Amino acid sequence: MALLELRGVGRTVSRVDDRPLVILNGVDLVVDVGDRLSIVGRSGSGKSTLLNLLGLLDSPTEGEIFFDDAPTRQFSARQRDVTRGRDVGFIFQQFNLLQGRTALENVMTPLLYDTGSAFWRRRSIATAMLERVGLGHRLASTPDRLSGGEQQRVAIARALVRGPRLILADEPTGALDIETGESVMALLDEIATASSAALVTITHDPAIAALATRRFRLERGVLVPWAEVLL
Ligand SMILES: Nc1ncnc2c1ncn2[C@@H]1O[C@H](COP(=O)(O)OP(=O)(O)OP(=O)(O)O)[C@@H](O)[C@H]1O
């Protein structure tokens, strides 16, 4: 079942010199429930721009994006925010944790926006999530007391605490050594599998890209399937 579908998606921005810059062009992509996709591409090829579109942070200037078969062009700003908050989890290279806040507080943060019972149960839900990523003993630690791998585990717990159906990871292992990166990817895959979430990973690392079942390369804004295994 298609969770997300991009049809003929493009994104063009105007520059200071008024010449338009085509960042993405004619992107067709279907992300199914439980899919594992990787996207590689040179710096400036449009990877982050594409991820922002997949996460409903930006809108395409051409084409259409469907979420659960609904055209997102017709979504109100609130509908986009609600859909994103409920269904999309973001993981970044630099973790983006709230400094000065404990691991538990960081993971509880997305639940503050939950209108259901999860809001009232946020402490126990966040605790269980941190236990799941192996950090049950570091609930009270602030990011400055955690290693890079531990910080990324907190970020994963925070991204997944609301049970998103789509996980978007932008260079999730970029700031980690190879071994820690592999264990972070294994954890991401395990949690995504348990909740049937789709996982889209942007990476420069061919070994990380090869973990996905569907691999793509962005070449100057054009998305091309990439079957080559580089291991
Ligand atoms: N709002 C904008 N206005 C002008 N140019 C932009 C805008 N957003 C992105 N670009 C340009 O579009 C190109 C693609 O940007 P994008 O950040 O998507 O690339 P990327 O593949 O993620 O790069 P990197 O791997 O270096 O992060 C870049 O040349 C960037 O400078």
Image (cartoon, rainbow, N blue to C red):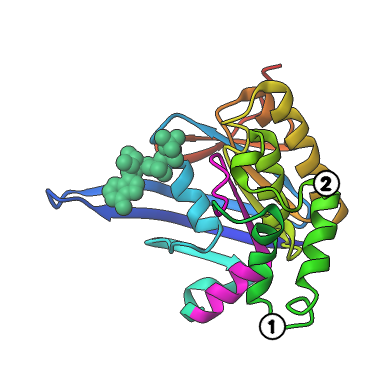
Picture quadrant of residue 106? bottom right
Query: Considering depth in this image, is 190 or 28 the residue closer to the camera?
Result: 190
Residue at horizontal 65 percent and vertical 49 percent from the top: 155
Mark 1 nearby-residue class (10 Å; few <14, some 14–19, many ≥20): few
Depicted 31 relative to depicted 110: above or below: above
Residue at horizontal 76 percent and vertical 63 percent from the top: 163
The tally of labels here is 2
Closer to the N terminus: mark 1 or mark 2?
1
Residue pushed farthest top? 231
Mark 2 nearby-residue class (10 Å; few <14, some 14–19, many ≥20): few
Residue at horizontal 49 percent and vertical 55 percent from the top: 52
Q: Residue 5 location, x and y as percent?
A: 61, 60
Query: Considering depth in this image, is 73 or 171 the residue closer to the camera?
Result: 171
Query: Considering depth in this image, is 209 or 114 the residue closer to the camera?
Result: 114
Type of residue at label 2? His
Residue pushed farthest left? 17
Question: What residue is disc 1 on?
Answer: 115
Q: Considering the numbered disc 2 on the image, is that residue within a helix, a strand or a loop?
A: helix
Query: Considering depth in this image, is 65 or 81 the residue closer to the camera?
Result: 81
Residue at horizontal 53 percent and vertical 64 percent from the top: 65
Q: Residue 126 location, x and y as percent?
A: 77, 62
- Ligand 1: give its quadrant: top left
Residue 5 included in the magenta stretch of the image: no
User: Considering the image in quadrants, where does the N terminus appear?
Assistant: bottom right
- 94 horizontally vs 149: left or right: left
User: What segment is highlighted magenta in the picture?
Assistant: 78-98
Residue 114 appearing in the image: yes
Question: What residue is disc 2 on?
Answer: 137
Q: Nearer the viewer, mark 1 or mark 2?
A: 2
Type of residue at label 1? Thr
Residue 45 appearing in the image: no
Q: Which mark is residue 183?
A: none
